[in-house]
Image: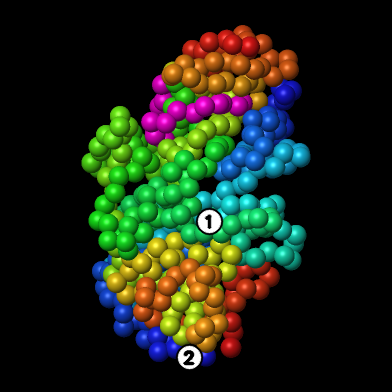
Amino acid sequence: MNVQNNVKTMRQDIAKRAADELGEGEVINLGVGIPTLIPEYLGDKHVFLHSENGLLGTGPAPEAGQINPDLINASKQPVTELPGSAIFDSALSFAMIRGGHVDTAVIGALQVDQTGELANWAVPGKDILGVGGAMDLVAGVQKVILTMTHTSKSGEAKIVESLTYPSSGYRKADVLITEKAVFTFKNNQMYLVEVADGVTVEDIEETTAASFVVAL
Amino acid sequence: MTSKKEISLTDISKYIKDGDQVLVGGFGLSGCPLTIVDEIAKTDVKDLTIVSNNLGEPQKGLGKLLVNGQIKKAIGSYFTTHRGAVNAWNEGWLEIELLPQGTMAEGIRAAGAGIPAFYTPTGAGTKLSENKEVREFDGKEYVLEKSIPGDVALIRAHKADEYGNLVYRKTQENFNTAMAMAGKIVIAEVDEIVPTGELKPEEIKTQHLFVDYLVKTRYEVEGGTFVERTK
């Protein structure tokens, strides 16, 4: 990962690194934002993409003129279906999620604390009118990978000692990927396991408002 | 083909009354009974509680009922991107009950399956479980969620047979089968009604015992979107 100020490049770098984290043959649910870029970086790796609205085996966006408005993903974008895909209803789709049958969710976060507890659905002081499937995913999947820019646009830390944004649930994240670093969480402790090219541990300490163990 | 369950569009209003809790299928516009919603928008029925993932778009689907002021309360999972709903809520004339999407789907299914409430891990430890009963099982907290029945369920499928068995087009099913189970009166909007026996038993997703009435849609897919037929 190269450190770039350009937000687009940052987001692509994060998606690329997150793609490396996924295992061959896993069932993956990709959240909105950065995670939607991941399929571009999967290379030869084969995974099954699960969409909350009832599709396992989601394919790329259709060609113009081939759009079926009844074949969409959880972001309501038109998609295609890959060979071997399966379609089902919302209740069954969330049974897959809550029941622990989906291997990994890659989701964006607004904030994460040093234990791995995350906030990804509401901003303090703003109307709380949407949650979608965020909390079901956090509660149910086997592994939660968070993708987010290391700090906010104004440079504020998003990795904090304790959440000031509304929590998404008790479940802790397993991995956090930013443009600067990769962290893992175990037993309420955060570990710095990787830094991007050109980034120092001091850089990470300066932009992270949480304590972590350096485990490079 | 006709069916004993088929009713005319103008009959729809007979089955919906002021103050009803109405389950409306759809994830965005896919699987939303657009024709039925249009018919309700032509009536005076009001104070509806709408249970639907979101509230359509401003001029399509449930957005029409919102603009008309026919909706008192919306129960769903995602209204953030619907400016009309956000404004109505800010102005104080629309009540919103926000549920995690999986809790909403399971709540509807449970209502149709004879289960009055259920415990879910989703939302435990969050603002959405405040004021809800929480119980520990094997050291983990779960939230008690009530099932979500409907006075009426308005659903959308691709084809029906004469009995009212339903099949869907791609991801059109979403909340529709669960809603058919949970509604006291269930009206399904379909593209066509085919002779009984034409649908394979194993492809039927919503079984006829859940479906009371059928109407034919006025919408078709054109240019990648849903367009109302002009004739």
Question: What secondary structure is the stretch in magenta mostly built from?
Answer: loop
**Residue occupying the point 49% across, 82% down:** B161
Q: Check the residue under mark 2 and report the chain it is in.
A: B
Label 2 element class: loop
Tally of marks: 2
**Percent coordinates x, y for residue A50 in the rendering:** 57, 48
Which quadrant does the C terminus of chain A fall into? top right
Asked if the residues shown at circle 2 and circle 1 are in contact, with their CB atoms under 8 angstroms apart, the answer is no
**Percent coordinates x, y for residue A132 in the rendering:** 46, 48
Q: Nearer the viewer, residue B105 or B229?
A: B105
Q: Which residues are magenta?
A: A162-178
Which quadrant does the N terminus of chain A fall into? top right
**In this rendering, would A4 be left or right of B39?**
right
**In this rendering, would A191 be left or right of A67?**
left
Label 1 element class: loop
Q: How is the image coloured?
A: rainbow
Residue A45 location, quadrant: top right
**Mark 1: amino acid:** Gly
The label shown at residue B2 is 2
Q: In the figure, A136 relative to B15: above or below?
A: above
Residue A64 location, quadrant: bottom right
**Percent coordinates x, y for residue B197 in the rendering:** 52, 83
The label shown at residue A54 is 1
Disc 2 and disc 1: Cα gap in Å? Answer: 30 Å
**Percent coordinates x, y for residue B98 in the rendering:** 36, 49
**Residue occupying the point 62% across, 68% down:** B225
Asked if residue A170 lies in the magenta stretch, the reply is yes
Q: In the figure, A154 relative to B59: above or below?
A: above
